[in-house]
Image: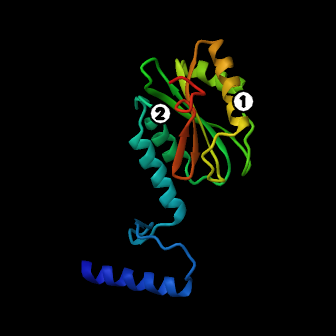
Amino acid sequence: MNTQNVSQAIYSMEVSLQKSHPNAFQSALHVRDTQGNYVMASDSQILAEAERAIDFRYPTGTVFESPRASGEFFRAKLAGRERECFAVAFLNNQHQLLAYGELFNGTISAVEVHPREIAREALRINAAAVVLAHNHPSFSPEPSKADKTITVRIKDALALIGVRVLDHVVVAGNETTSMAERGFVNF
């Protein structure tokens, strides 16, 4: 079977699948199955590859030079989540990424954050600074009163061990809000 015939066969299978399951996710991406045949990639395979691509785009050593750079990083990591997730980028003195961690997961409207756990992880990684972030599944980019309160608590706790909080980014869909740019944290 030549390449044109294979392409036509794949197209025919995709059209048939779309007619039989009109609300199903239809991928334009293909992967090889265990027999070496190309099949449509599942949504979980696409998401796994997207996660690998994001990690490739932001490797260890990525510099967090501004609130904008932090926003782009966390938007790539947290946008589209259905539940709140609180994440931390652990940085060295030159604001280069040492590690990234999604430390706390919550509900659709809240996440419980423990400053002690962030401090413990910062010490384990030997971080000099952190950038905090969490997502708002409601798509509201405005930091809440609780967001501001926990930022101050984390900043105070980390100051005791010599770790600076550079920013707290709120991810709301494709929008981000930098609390540093709003004057809540000094970048």
Residue 116 in percent (x, y) is at 71, 23
- Outermost residue on the front side: it is 182
Residue 108 in percent (x, y) is at 72, 52
Above or below, 100 against 42 in this view is above
Mark 2 to mark 1 CA distance (whole Å): 20 Å
Above or below, 55 against 91 in this view is below
Residue 79: which disc?
A: none
Which of the pair 26/5 is nearer the observer?
26
Q: Which SS class for mark 2?
A: helix
Tell me which amino acid carries mark 1: Thr
Tell me which amino acid carries mark 2: Pro
Q: How is the protein colored in the picture? A: rainbow
Above or below, 5 against 152 in this view is below
Residue 5 in percent (x, y) is at 28, 84
- Earlier-in-chain disc, 2 versus 1: 2
Asked whether the residues under the numbered discs 2 and 1 touch, taking CB atoms below 8 Å apart as contact, a structural biologist would say: no
- In the shown orientation, is residue 162 left or right of residue 115? left
Residue located beneath label 1 in the image: 149
Above or below, 23 against 58 in this view is below
Which quadrant would the N terminus be assigned to in this image? bottom left
Residue 126 in percent (x, y) is at 54, 18
Q: Which SS class for mark 1?
A: helix
Residue 67: which disc?
A: 2
| Residue at left offset 56%, top offset 32% | 182
